[in-house]
Image (cartoon, grey):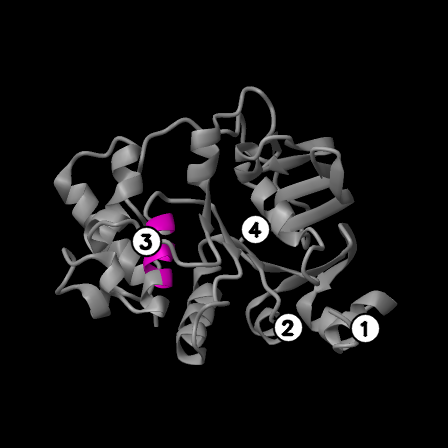
Amino acid sequence: MVNIIEMPEITSPTIANQPAPSPEPGVERAMIEIEDVDFSYGTHQVLHDVSLSVPARAVTAFIGPSGCGKTTLLRCLNRMNDLIDGAQITKGSIRIEGTDINASSVDVVDLRRRVGMVFQKSNPFPKSIYDNVAYGLRIAGVTKRSLIDEAVEKSLRSAALWEEVKDRLHVSGYGLSGGQQQRLCIARALAVEPEIVLMDEPCSALDPIATAKVEELIRQLKEQYTIVIVTHNMQQAGRCSDRTAFFYLGRLIEVDDTAKIFSNPGQRQTEEYITGRFG
């Protein structure tokens, strides 16, 4: 069992000006609210009128065939698409705890601390295991060695990696297996105390044993984090997620509890996709 442990506090500006209102009794609190979003790469529109709420401390899976816009939407949630010339939201808004993340007043560096990301291909830095995890802390201005040591250990424990690497923290991260490298990247994301963790096909390059470890980790991390995962693997979505959103040709076709999506979808296109008739 992985222990999810409080990280040392990192002082940095927050994008939220005030706390989000408490939900009504019996209503899940929405951490992320996507409203009427259109998104384009230059003149090519790839998202059309997408509206979606992502609940706090749960796993939400984005599924759909290649090119349907799910990764583009994921990258909108921490403004990674800002790095692409001509890429922009042309209509609608994305709010995290009530704050429009595309407002001019938002500190993008702080946003990306709050909204961590794990990519499809594990991408450890050419540094030691220790320095990979400590990197974000140092960028955030943490200099006290004892705080960094504590955060590195806790992050590696949270990523179910500590016992495997505790005796070789100063060995290159490149010396780890593929599954271990992906968990190292997860530890690196957790070290800076995010509230949301985005995962883009985190198991696509892993073998079944490593995939099972990452999936178990995802299920445990939702106790502390809001997680959004993009996956082509229907079984993985079924195993890991609480809610599933199905996209097709840049449109959100259906979103519901994962059990309902897979047992009794409300839309014909959803049923045809999950039963393998196309995709």
Q: x, y percentage for residue 31? A: 59, 45
Instruction: Please tell me whether mark 1 sits on a helix, a strand or a loop.
Output: helix
Q: Looking at the image, tell me whether mark 4 or mark 2 is earlier in sequence order.
A: 4
Q: What residue is drawn where x is 38% and y is 49%?
A: 189
Instruction: Please tell me whether mark 3 sits on a helix, a strand or a loop.
Output: loop
Task: Answer with left or right where residue 104 lies relative to residue 279.
Answer: left
Q: Quadrant of residue 236?
A: bottom right
Q: Residues within 10 Å of mark 3 (few under 14, many from 20)?
A: many
Alpha carbon distance from label 4 to label 2:
22 Å
Alpha carbon distance from label 3 to label 4:
28 Å
Q: Quadrant of the N terminus?
A: bottom left
* Residue at the disc numbered 4: 56
Q: Residues within 10 Å of mark 4 (few under 14, many from 20)?
A: many
Name, please, the residue furthest toward the top.
105
Segment colored magenta: 182-189
Q: Residues within 10 Å of mark 2 (few under 14, many from 20)?
A: some
Q: What residue is drawn where x is 56% and y is 32%?
A: 82
